[in-house]
């Protein structure tokens, strides 16, 4: 999905005793992380007094259509322990249901039978007092069914409930919608895709191949954060296709390949004056941003859309 083009950092203070979440298992991810309607996740209608989480999927890093495979999907929820002891329940559980009806009113109270008719794919996790903070819920099958059924045209709507949670505060924004835009504790969804099946947007620039010869082109290049030694602080993704430009710009060019008028003028001078030292370089012409989740100072969890992380097009400026 294409992240919102902002550079704001989103920080969450973590308890120093809290276990850091384990690293997501895949190599490419798009992150649905904002609770605003112009981005990707909004707080939706109320069902049984609980506000639904509604996710919108858009395209990340050139992926189009439905031609990719979801390897894993994780919902991250913030659950803080506010009181220890006293809870008489054997376990404290968070339940997540997918809403399968698009005809629910803005606010509705459902009986158990009615609730069963409009929900599917229940998933649950147990909360442990030793692991207060961000919780990971595996929604792989839920997201796969959502994308296969809706083709990303419909929102993913989730009902989240907590059983025996009197000692916990789960950040679901049930009270007020006004705080969701800037609240650093808002939930987010990370969807990992298989890069081997992802389709790419067709670009003006040439992608390097056996047929491109020495012509200026974009070379796909995967960067592993583990290889860089960054895997101890980068949570997601584990790596990404940064890409780079290679090839020759010295061959004869037609005017339609010039990026600017300046390029046209310089190329004319280079050819008429035989200025071999003015050979243009194959360089990036277009970049895109990438979403990343990582640990900052003081064990803060930061989600940020980093600009100009991916080379999308190469040319001879």
Image (cartoon, rainbow, N blue to C red):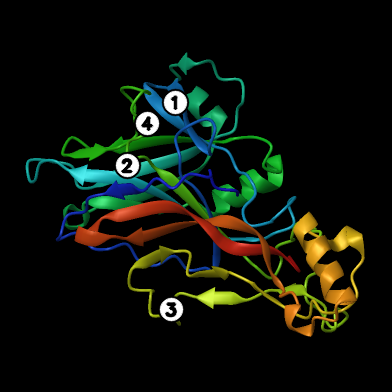
Residue 33's spot in the image, x, y percent?
Answer: 46, 44
Q: Quote the CA–CA distance across marks 1 and 2.
A: 33 Å
**Where does label 4 land, which residue?**
180
Q: Residue at x 7, y 45 (%)?
A: 85
Secondary structure beneath dot 1 equals helix
Q: Quote the CA–CA distance across marks 4 and 2.
A: 8 Å
317 above or below 118? below
27 above or below 63? below
- Position of the C terminus by quadrant: bottom right
- The reply to whether callout 4 and callout 2 are in contact (CB within 8 Å) is no
Q: Residue at x 22, y 56 (%)?
A: 131
Q: Closer to the N terminus: mark 3 or mark 1?
A: 1
Q: Residue at x 85, y 77 (%)?
A: 273
Residue 147's spot in the image, x, y percent?
Answer: 65, 46
- The reply to whether callout 3 and callout 2 are in contact (CB within 8 Å) is no
Q: Closer to the N terminus: mark 1 or mark 4?
A: 1
**Where does label 2 land, which residue?**
184
**Where does label 1 land, which residue?**
112
Q: Quote the CA–CA distance across marks 4 and 3.
A: 33 Å
Q: Quote the CA–CA distance across marks 3 and 2.
A: 27 Å
Front residue of 163/192: it is 192
Residue 43's spot in the image, x, y percent?
Answer: 45, 29
Q: Closer to the N terminus: mark 3 or mark 2?
A: 2
Residue 78 figure quarter: top left
Q: Residue at x 62, y 53 (%)?
A: 60
Q: Quote the CA–CA distance across marks 1 and 4.
A: 29 Å
**Where does label 3 land, which residue?**
226
Local crowd at mark 3 within 10 Å, few (<14), some, or many (≥20)? few
């Amino acid at each position: 999905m294409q992240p919102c083009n902002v550079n704001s950092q989103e920080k969450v203070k973590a308890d120093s005793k809290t276990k850091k979440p384990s690293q997501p298992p895949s190599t490419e991810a798009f992150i649905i992380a904002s609770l605003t309607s112009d981005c990707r996740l909004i707080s939706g209608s109320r069902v049984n007094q609980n506000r639904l989480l509604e996710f919108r999927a858009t395209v990340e890093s050139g992926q189009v259509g439905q031609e990719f495979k979801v390897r894993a999907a994780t919902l991250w929820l913030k659950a803080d322990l506010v009181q220890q002891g006293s809870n008489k329940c054997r376990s404290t559980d968070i339940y997540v249901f997918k809403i399968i009806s698009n005809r629910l009113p803005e606010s509705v109270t459902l009986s158990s039978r009615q609730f069963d008719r409009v929900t599917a794919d229940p998933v649950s996790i147990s909360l442990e007092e030793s692991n207060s903070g961000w919780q990971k819920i595996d929604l792989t099958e839920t997201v796969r069914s959502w994308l296969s059924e809706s083709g990303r045209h419909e929102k993913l709507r989730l009902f989240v409930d907590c059983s025996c949670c009197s000692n916990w505060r789960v950040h679901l924004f049930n009270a007020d919608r006004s705080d969701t835009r800037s609240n650093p504790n808002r939930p987010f969804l990370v969807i990992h895709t298989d890069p081997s099946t992802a389709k790419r947007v067709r670009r003006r620039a040439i992608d390097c191949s056996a047929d491109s010869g020495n012509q200026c082109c974009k070379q796909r290049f995967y960067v592993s954060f583990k290889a860089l030694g960054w895997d101890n602080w980068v949570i997601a993704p584990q790596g990404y296709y940064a890409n780079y430009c290679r090839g020759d710009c010295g061959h004869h060019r037609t005017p339609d390949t010039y990026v600017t008028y300046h390029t046209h003028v310089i190329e004319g001078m280079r050819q008429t004056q035989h200025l071999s030292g003015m050979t243009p370089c194959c360089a990036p012409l277009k970049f895109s941003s990438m979403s990343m989740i990582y640990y900052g100072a003081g064990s803060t969890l930061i989600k940020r859309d980093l600009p100009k992380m991916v080379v999308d097009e190469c040319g001879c400026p």
